[in-house]
Structure formats: C-alpha cells, structure tokens
Image: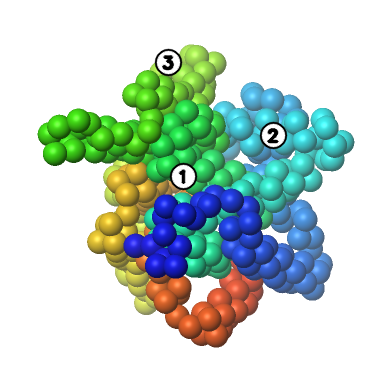
Amino acid sequence: MTDPESPAATRPEGSLRRAAPALLGYAAVRALGLAALGAWSAVNGGSARRLLSERWDSLWYTRVAELGYGYEVRLPNGDVHTNLAFFPLLPWLERTVHAVTSLSYPDAGLLVTAVASLAAAWGIFAVADHVHGRRTGVCAVLMWALLPVGVVQSIAYSESLFTALAAWSLYAALTGRWPTAGLLAAFAGLTRPVGVAVAASLWAAAITSFVGEHRHDGSAPRTDGARPWRRALAMIVAPLGAAGYVLWVGHRTGGGPLGYLDVQAGWRNGFDGGHAFGRFVAEKFTSLPSAPAGVALTAGVALVLWLYVACVRQGQPPALLVYTGTVVVLALCASGYFGSKPRLLLPAFPLLFPLALALARLRTSRSALVVGGAAVASATYGAFWLNGSGPP
C-alpha cells in the first residue's frame, strides 16, 4: 500500500525535506519524555543524566570505551560478567567523540545516542514511506517514539544505533543499493548480537530480487538495475561484522568459534526456544497477587504475534518480514533477564506499520489527539520506570 497522492515513481524517498515532519514529531515526543524524566528525577533527588548515561549497561559500554576489553565481575554464585558480552561499535564511537570533543565518556554516549536516535527515526520513515507512503511513514516514526519503553531510545544503550543501521540497511536493500546495504548490515552486526537479523534480511532481499529477475515470463530476465556482483558482494559483507566479533571473542577467551556463547552463559543469557520465558510467565499464574502480571505478559506476547501476522497479511516485503521475525524470535526465546524483553523488541519497528496505517487513516484532529495522549502516557511511564527498576 502507498499513499495515492505520492506515487512511488515520483517521491524523493529518504530525503531530509520529506522526512522533516516525522523528525520534528519524533524530537517533540522525545523532548517531552526527557522533560518528564528530568522533573521526576529532581523531585526524587536524583539525576536524569545519571539515569541515562551512568547506570546499567551504559556503564559497561563506557568502561569498554575508556579501558578496552578485559573487565569482568565475579559474582558470589560463580557467574562471571565480562564486558566481552558487549559488541564494540557503540564504545568505539564513544571513544571517538570523547577524543574529538573532550566530553566525558558518559556524555559522549549520550551524544552518540541522540544522533543515532534521529538517524533511526529517519530510517524508519524512509522504510515506511517506501512501503506504505509518506503519511504512514510519519505515523510509524511517531509510534516508535511513543512506545512505553521509548525512553530507552535516549539512554546510552545500543538500541538506537542498531535500529538506525538496521533501518537504513533495509531501505538500501529495498531500493537496490546493495553495497550500501551490506556495509550497514556489517556495522549493525558490530553493534548487537541481533545483527544477524539484518544480514538475514539482506539475504532475503537479494534472493527475492534474483528470483524476480529470472521469473519474468520465462524470457529476458527483469533487472532492478543492480549488477549481480553487487548483490553477491552485499551478501558476503553483511554477516562479517557479527561473525568477526564473535570469532575474535572466541580467540581471546580460548573458547573457539563458539566462545562468545560461553561469555553470554556467564550472564545467564542464551537461546532456549522460549522455554525459560514460558515458565516465567506460567509461574505468574500460580498466585493471585502475580496473576495480573501473567495476564499482561501473555497479552503482550499475543499482541506482538498478532502484529507480525498483520505485517504478513499487509504484504510487507520479505526482507522486512525476515528481519522482524528474527528480532522477535531472538527477543522472546532468549533465556536472559525477562524484564529486558520490551527493549529488545525496540528494533522490530516494522511491527508498528499496521498501527501506523490505522493512525494514518484517521482525521488529523483525531490522530493528533491520539498522539498527544500517548505522548503524555509514554513520558510519564518512562520517568516512573527509570526512577524505579529501570532497564537492565
């Protein structure tokens, strides 16, 4: 589906001017969230800056940026938390910004995240605009900003950076810019383990493009303008980031090609097909006080699955479906800390396209009311969340 007023052949997809309404709306929502966080933190005698840059995983990233790899914490139960679990692109960028600007490492992380979040919003708009049209693109960006855990987009974590690289890699693949797509996929693989989803989506796009060329009524092949070697090069380059870091960790630890899995096991992270998460949800129903949490978790998983089915029914390109499906599977089927699953789903932005389409169909006054109410709710929840348990 596309907007009837902006046919695909004539729209300047990806241009900053075309994306400006989406970026301005995104910045407004995030500014409201940060203002709410600052006010809530001040009332509690805390620091919003510290919550955003000097707690939880952000501390691990800044330690890598400042001291390099090799730092670890041994817990009383025998677990070993090593910073080798954290992929290197974000701390590399933090180190670079620190060297160029003399900002502290935490502040450098905040700057990188701020720029990356805007780049992610722009990339989400470009993909949604390409698939569904400009109005839906704007709504998709707003929906991403309005997520209850949207405040994570402003924390010195790697979610925003990864989403930016993933979105632009997907857009490049969908528009036939194969070398660019492969390079961005490789950088995504240096950002988070879920970078494999971007590589898989590029392979899906390349295979779909190849099949489309050679299925054209059995005669002369139809081409998207790309030379075959460009697609092949992109497919080779795409997984190199993730594979390179994983192999380096295995070499450093002496664990061989699968040494990174041992590092993750020290954090009690792994992939068990969702068994541990399913047991965690089921245990919520064993007592009345925790039953509402079990209902909420079940409803949340059902919503994610329903949105994915909606994406399939709306005919999203195979590259988006492969990317989103991989992100969802890796997030829901991981055996690590279950409270992190909502933020692990942040990069699965194509899940929001069905909701964005519905929002785009509303009258402007109604959509503004929906967005305004959701923005207040998201800002309030984000401030409450970070001043409470917060994201691990």
For the point 64% across and 46% down, which residue is it? 116
- Residue 360 to residue 61: above or below: below
The image position of residue 46, as x and y in percent, is 79, 63
| Disc 1: which residue | 171
Report the mark closest to the observer, 1 or 3.
1
The image position of residue 171, as x and y in percent, is 46, 44
> Of the residues under marks 2 and 3, which one precedes in the sequence?
2
Q: CA distance from mark 2 to mark 1?
A: 23 Å
The image position of residue 146, as x and y in percent, is 55, 68
- Residue 358 to residue 264: above or below: below
Report the mark closest to the observer, 2 or 3.
2
Mark 3 Cα shell of 10 Å, populated few (<14), some (14-19), many (≥20): some
Q: CA distance from mark 2 to mark 3?
A: 28 Å
For the point 84% across and 40% down, which residue is it? 103
- Report the number of discs: 3
- Residue 294 to residue 126: above or below: below
Dot 1 and dot 3 residues touching (CB under 8 Å) = no
Q: Amino acid at mark 3?
A: Gly
> Of the residues under marks 2 and 1, which one precedes in the sequence?
2
Judged from the image, the secondary structure of the residue bearing numbered disc 2 is helix
Mark 2 Cα shell of 10 Å, populated few (<14), some (14-19), many (≥20): some
Depth order, front residue of 27/93: 27
| Disc 2: which residue | 93
- Taking the view exactly as shown, the residue that stands out farthest to the left is 218
The image position of residue 172, as x and y in percent, is 47, 40
Q: Is residue 339 left or right of residue 379?
A: left
Judged from the image, the secondary structure of the residue bearing numbered disc 3 is helix
| Disc 3: which residue | 256
Depth order, front residue of 74/326: 326
Q: Is residue 247 left or right of residue 159?
A: left
Depth order, front residue of 33/351: 351
